[in-house]
Image (cartoon, helix red, strand yellow):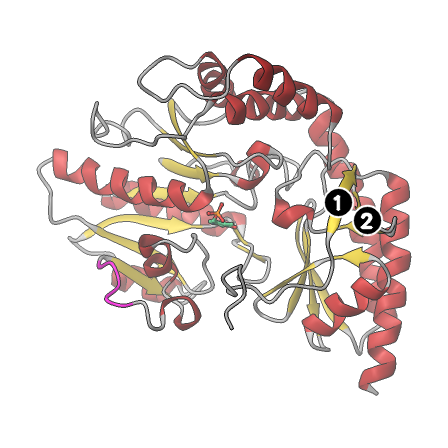
Amino acid sequence: MIPSILPTYSRAPLSFVKGEGAWLLESGGDRYLDLGAGIAVNALGHANPDLVAALTEQAQSLWHVSNLYNIPAQQKLADLLVDHTFADTAFFTNSGTEACELAVKMARKYFYDKGQPEKTDIITFSGAFHGRSAAGIAAAGSEKMTKGFGPLLPGFINLPFGDHEALSLAINDKTAAILIEPIQGEGGIRTVPDQCLKGLRDRCNYHGILLIFDEVQCGMGRTGKLFAHEWAGVTPDIMMVAKGIGGGFPLGAVLATENAASGMTAGTHGSTYGGNPLACAVGARVMEIMTDDAFLPEVTRKAGLLRQGLESLVAAHPGVFQEVRGAGLMLGLKCNAPNTDVVTAGYGEHLLTVPAADNVVRLLPPLTLTDEDISEALIRLDRAAAKVQAHTV
Ligand SMILES: *Cc1c(COP(=O)(O)O)cnc(C)c1O
């Protein structure tokens, strides 16, 4: 008999009732150290008092009015995003997937309005993840996500990750945009080198096409900059944001330059909930906290501590781990043993990590985890690795 929850997830037998910082509690009182943060969502930790205050304050005055009216919290969040990024304008969604939908529509509309309606193709890369909608799975193109769900939305050209030659051959008169995650999350914490992001920017300029970054997972302070592309010193035309921006409240956004957004006039796009007062009150508080001068340097300092510990861990358990990858607090342990064995052994040590493709274990902790949390995480990972090692030899 089908369960009352559609069984599209194989869930770990854990259920949490409370969160505090980087820790999750089960009803019996068992405490788990959370290095997954709800897949890079709880960027400021669980039950962050500032976010609880922002949400409850808003909840006591007004929950929802729709985008038929001005929403002060939405205006505040949009201004903060425009002030601190390349973008001139923002549209708010409830998820990363919806941000992908708008990014695709925006790119196509841009060329339609320029009198080049044939430019509809979006180039994407293997291992990408852009959400589970019809556009999102077509964009990613992997068999795992698309099989059985055809016919797929046309207009996506999926290329091998890192294949410069294939990219040169693929750009043609039908190309509208290149869509890429500066660091692939689901794909296994695969970083696009800075010089490649620069190269993509140059190619897009040369061909007059749009560059879209999907920073749903790698953005919002995760790499030690507000957005990962800042390390490369280049900017996109359009960017998808979600996950960390709501700190656990469902919120996403599409940020864009005035030029890229020029086709999106009144009536061309919409959302009932998108940019709702509750979500934006929390999002604005998240932005205020992350743009405090002291915040991002702390992320970088703690990321250094964690990374150093992980390098030692890899050296100590060569049968289990191969290397550390990623940037800031978006880290991956490429495994020699099955990654799911490592994640499961972690549960035994009351430590939460997240598997990814390419046999990687992802570490995406709250950016606010403490130095003690980092030491504890390394101790628990070491014990988990020892258990996996004992089982594999
Ligand atoms: C999670 C994710 C998405 C989809 O976001 P949802 O909020 O799950 O719809 C899109 N792109 C990337 C890079 C992601 O990590």
| Residue 26 pos. (x, y %) | 80, 50
Front residue of 198/279: it is 279
* Figure check: 318 above or below 82: below
User: Where are the magenta residues, as a range?
Assistant: 150-154
User: Which three-letter amino acid code belongs to the residue tagged 1?
Assistant: Val
Q: CB of mark 2 within 8 Å of CB of mark 1?
A: yes
Nearer the observer, 272 or 389: 272
Please identify the quarter of the rendering in which residue 225 is found. Answer: top right
Answer with left or right where residue 229 lies relative to residue 65: right
List x then y, in percent, for residue 323. Answer: 72, 66
**Which part of the image, by quadrant, shows the C terminus?**
bottom right
Q: Is residue 48 magenta?
A: no
Q: Alpha-carbon distance for marks 2 and 1?
A: 6 Å
Residue 224, labelled with which disc? Answer: none
Residue where numbered disc 1 is placed: 17
SS at mark 2 in the image: loop
Asked if residue 65 lies left or right of residue 117, the reply is: right
Q: How packed is label 1: few (under 14 Cα within 10 Å), some, or many (20 or more)? A: few
The mark that comes first in sequence, 2 or 1, is 1
- Which residue, given by chain and number where applicable, does mark 2 sit on? 27
Residue located at (24% from left, 29% from top):
264
Residue type (three-letter) at the residue carrying disc 2: Ser
